[in-house]
Amino acid sequence: MHTARPLGALMPQADKTASMREAIAEFVTDGATVALEGFTHLIPTAAGHEIIRQGRRDLTIARMTADIVTDQLIAGDCVSRLISSFVGNSTAGSLGELRRRVEAGTLAFEEYSHYGMICRYLAGAQRLPFYPLRSYAGSDVPAVNPSIRKVTSPYPAPDGGEEQIYVVPPLNPDVTIVQAQRADRAGNTQIWGLTGIQAEAVYAARKAIVVVEEVVADEVIRSDPNRTVVPAHAVDAVVVCPRGAHPAFVQGYYDRDGAFYREWSRISADPQRLRDWLDEWVRGTADHADYVAKLGEQRWAELAVGEAWSEPVNYGRRL
């Protein structure tokens, strides 16, 4: 007679935990295409800092919303090409170093719309040769990006004629790095709040690093399976890095550091001040824990958030 195996008796999975230093050293190499994804919150800032510390060069950075961490990587001389849709210091101003290098012609910039970037990740994740979209009709973006092209649909248009439609190529990063709230040691990664394009960016990549606020027991992940946005089989390394998204927020863990965003516009506007900041706060810190300590507990107390628990649900089971 077949007896169902209890959840606690599931076969153990491989432990993929690594330090940030180990994960970046193994998976981010000079000349690589690196996707850093997370929308509004869950931005992998600490991973970007470690890339700067390790002195990586000639990277292509893919990020839908190129923001402060992108500006820092460019100022750290890590980036030769940027693939992005939105560029700016979210609601607080400009990105000084990114702007200077684009205007000087020393940074290649491949521009898409938000949805164009999503379609590139979708094509990459599904191993498709391209992905069709309508939203470039009437836009000037195709005029500045020759990778956005038109093809003839193999199916007739509603009026019976031929239809031309825009397409974008797949994006297959060498490594995707995403931030999340929690994972187990095997890499089953859970996200709540804005989920963004993290799962698609991971599936599109050859390797994937997830950076989490905490590692939790397998039983915690299995108790709430629908929050598992990125499954273990798509993950190569799990890095535990509390407060690793600063100055962005992580839903349920800490708030957005609005003062930092406002200050960054002034820092990045001055090339010397920007270099000094990187020397003090990134190259001058041993790791992200050192950076967190340097910010000070008073700063973190100001970013503390209250509780807003989600109600448990009944998944049901056989009696």
Image (cartoon, grey):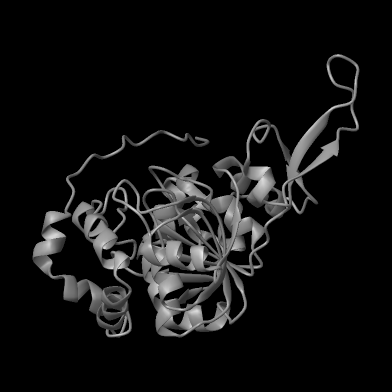
Residue at the spot 50% in from the left edge and 58% down from the top edge: 188
| Residue 36 x, y percent position in the rendering | 50, 62
Residue at the spot 75% in from the left edge and 42% down from the top edge: 167
| Residue 158 x, y percent position in the rendering | 83, 16
Camera-nearest residue between 314 and 66 = 66
Vertical placement of 302 versus 18: above or below? above
Q: Is residue 226 visible?
A: yes
Image position of 277 (left or right of 47):
left
| Residue 201 x, y percent position in the rendering | 59, 55
- Quadrant of residue 254 within the rendered picture: bottom left
Residue at the spot 26% in from the left edge and 56% down from the top edge: 261
Camera-nearest residue between 121 and 275 = 275
- Quadrant of residue 194 within the rendered picture: top left
| Residue 227 x, y percent position in the rendering | 45, 45
Q: Residue furthest top?
A: 159
Q: Is residue 19 visible?
A: no
- Quadrant of residue 212 within the rendered picture: bottom left
Image position of 39 (left or right of 310):
right
Q: Residue furthest left?
A: 298
Camera-nearest residue between 119 and 184 = 119
Camera-nearest residue between 101 and 201 = 101
Q: Residue furthest front?
A: 104
Residue at the spot 66% in from the left edge and 36% down from the top edge: 136
- Badge count: 0
